[in-house]
Amino acid sequence: MIRLILGDQLNRYHTWFSEQSEDITYAFFECYDEATYAPHHIQKVVGIFAGMRAFASALQAQGHKVHYGSIGQTLPSLGENLQKLCTELGTQRIEIQQPDEYRVQEHLLGLRENGFQIEVCSSEHFIADVEDFKVQFSGKKTLLMESFYRRMRKSTGIFMQGAQPIGGKWNYDASNRKALPKGHSIPPRYFPDTDVSAIVEDIQQANIPTIGSLGNPKHFYWPTTPEQAKDIFHYWLEHDLPFFGDFQDAMARNQWAMYHSRISFALNTKMIDPLWVCQEVERAYHEREEVSINAAEGFIRQILGWREFMRGAYWMAMPDYEDLNYFNHNAPLPSWFWTGKTKMECMKQSIGQSLDHAYAHHIQRLMITGNFMLLAGIDPSEVDRWYLGIYIDAFQWVEITNTRGMSQFADGGWIATKPYVSSANYIHKMSDYCAHCPYDRKTRAEKNSCPFNALYWDFYERKEGQLGNNPRIGMVYRTLNKMKDADKVALRERARWIHDHLENL
Ligand SMILES: Cc1cc2nc3c(=O)[nH]c(=O)nc-3n(C[C@H](O)[C@H](O)[C@H](O)COP(=O)(O)OP(=O)(O)OC[C@H]3O[C@@H](n4cnc5c(N)ncnc54)[C@H](O)[C@@H]3O)c2cc1C
Ligand code: SF4
């Protein structure tokens, strides 16, 4: 029998590995198709292959039988490689762990039509049950993360005191929105250090097109083993968690990770366990005075709440979700999204660091790049393609729900209760970007006015038919209605100019 291990299934603690048998071959394939279905960042491809290679070596060292297909030696698709290995081993039996992505699930289950016996088991990683999620939200026009999150807190007992939430409140989000004070310096971060030169060479020889840069291949700084993932997490827990709460939404020039944990890649490839992460944060809260309740709860909410919620939403809505486009947006993505060459400082910083590090933190993804894409009316499929490729942690189940759902409102408000858009006011409040930008954040309709300003008001004006009844944005429409006609005309003209010159901003 073959047991297939995908690049995002690097869970060393899966019960599969508690038994050893000569009849079981663990199969890993680095495939061209998987490395190229979106224009992936070089660090993402390297990180996944490095994680797979380290995992395969660890299994071999434990005495398991392993077949490893390196890039350059494999056939393009997973299915072709599996069929070839089945023929070599004289078996039709393949066990897989439940894939996280619909595309991969369909591809693998499709092998049944060729006579292969495919058995599916749990990946033993996620905390929530997808079927329960479907029951909880069946028939609902809007999913409410908060109600899901409370259920998760109750069912796991995480951050609970008996039947009540610790501290008496479920959610401390309102305390997590401080900007960095002037002169605040962020201490140096901890990075793992792995030599990935051989993998980079293999990727180049296999002609895999990639985006972004890698830095020095002798010092790759994303985790490639569970030990490294735990090291990053523990360093963050000790040094950064106390600041995470207050500054969760803050942004600063040349600070690409702020106080964020950078564990999404390790989580999404299953190198570390999400429940364990939440338990460690809860323990830190109980043991250390400097860990505030808003820091601990804020972090637990991201994992026990948002991450599990997005997975439930994904499996409830796919495959139709891929085609949703509530606003019928169809503008092409400006080419500077692939280079970072724009005058807008906030976009230059957020895109530049994404190309350099395959990473941007949540508020940059949501309130800088995503905000701009929605206001500019970019086709959501182009938006998905960009996010899916550029981030090291991007796998469709958690990318598309955040992108099409939370960020682009392409599902008409199923995941997010309002569009996440803002003018320069918010960006200025939460960052130092505007102070270094040639655009004027204070004006709306001048030649050098910040593009976000005119786009923001024009967006709401044009979408009144689709958004006007939303109680969460009543204030916006009240302000818009009070605006003088001449101001509205000027805003419309400036917005039109920006839409026509997206390439030149
Ligand atoms: C447009 C957009 C696209 C995104 N695409 C992805 C993606 O492809 N993959 C991905 O893992 N996350 C995605 N996110 C969510 C979030 O931005 C990243 O999880 C986070 O930035 C990862 O960095 P971190 O580990 O330092 O996170 P931290 O801020 O330290 O948070 C800790 C963990 O919480 C989880 N988390 C936080 N927010 C979310 C969320 N909204 N949805 C799901 N999990 C969350 C992540 O696992 C993260 O590692 C996206 C968000 C937006 C707005
Ligand atoms: S002025 Fe506008 S474009 Fe410039 S950094 Fe601020 S929000 Fe971004």
Image (spheres, grey):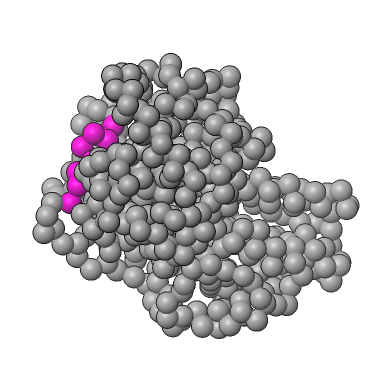
Q: Position of residue 173 (x, y in %)?
A: 27, 35
Q: Position of residue 180 (x, y in %)?
A: 18, 51
Q: Where is residue 432 in the image (x, y as percent from the top left)?
A: 22, 54
Quadrant of res 495 = top left
Q: Nearer the viewer, residue 300 or 217?
A: 217
- Residue range of the region highlighted in magenta in the rendering: 171-180
Q: Position of residue 70 (x, y in %)?
A: 66, 75
Residue at left offset 32%, top offset 39%: 445
| Location of residue 168 with respect to 216 vertically, above or below | above
Q: Which of 175 and 60 is in front in this view?
A: 175
Q: Is residue 444 magenta?
A: no
| Location of residue 296 with respect to 156 vertically, above or below | below
Q: Which residue lies furthest to the left in this view?
A: 183
Residue at left offset 80%, top offset 49%: 110
Q: Which residue lies furthest to the front in this view?
A: 486
Quadrant of res 305 = top left
Quarter in which the C terminus is drawn: bottom left
Left/right placement of residue 501 relative to residue 318 reads left
Count the labels in the image: 0
| Location of residue 301 with respect to 58 vertically, above or below | above
Left/right placement of residue 325 relative to residue 65 reads left
| Location of residue 134 with respect to 375 vertically, above or below | above
Residue at left offset 42%, top offset 26%: 461
Instruction: Residue 492: tell me if it is visible.
Output: yes
Quarter in which the N terminus is drawn: bottom right
Q: Which of 335 and 12 is in front in this view?
A: 335
Residue at left offset 75%, top offset 67%: 76
Instruction: Residue 262: tell me if it is visible.
Output: no
Left/right placement of residue 283 relative to residue 368 reads left
State whether the magenta stretch is mostly helix, strand or loop: loop
